[in-house]
Amino acid sequence: SYLLQVLRYLIEFELKESDNPRRLLRRGTCAFSILFKLFSEGLFSAKLFLTATLHEPIMQLLVEDEDHLETDPNKLIERFSPVQQEKLFGEKGTEKFKQRVQEMVDSNEAKLVTLVNKFIGYLKQNTYCFPH
């Protein structure tokens, strides 16, 4: 129970307060990631809880989101052919091109924050059924 309270505290004050929670979780070096990994690897029942809790949001992500949620402008551009780049962003090298690329990056970052918050919400909703 105390461990769950610590994890909840870390969600509130480490992940929610972060400008880029995705980066924190991906690196696996934040306190939440380390503690969560140790916790989830140690309990089979916790793995079952996580599977049950995360199944719905993961399926929603797979079904609803066809976007490649890239936040690196260079990688985002590489994804598209030169013809697609010009169609989406305008002429390469112009200020308009840079602005439209940045708009797509900003949009992707906002979508990622929304998705992370949705996952956190599902975790919070289902803590009542966490095995004791």
Image (cartoon, rainbow, N blue to C red):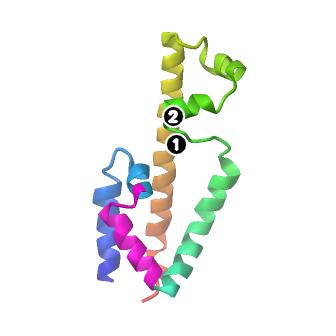
How dense is the environment of label 2, judged by Cα within 10 Å: few (below 14), some, or many (20 and up)? Answer: some
- Callout 1–callout 2 Cβ contact below 8 Å: yes
What kind of residue is marked 2? Ser
Residue visible at 56% across and 81% down in the picture: 48
Q: Which residue is mark 2?
A: 107
Q: Quadrant of residue 84?
A: top right
CA gap, disc 1 to disc 2? 6 Å
Label drawn at residue 60:
none
The one of 53 and 29 positioned closer to us in this rendering: 29
Check residue 37 for magenta coloring. Answer: yes
Above or below, 116 relative to 6: above
How far across and how far down the image is residue 1, in percent? Answer: 33, 83
Above or below, 52 relative to 114: below
Label drawn at residue 111:
1
Residue bounds of the magenta highlight? 27-42
Q: Quadrant of residue 9?
A: bottom left
Q: Quadrant of residue 7?
A: bottom left
Residue visible at 56% across and 41% down in the picture: 69
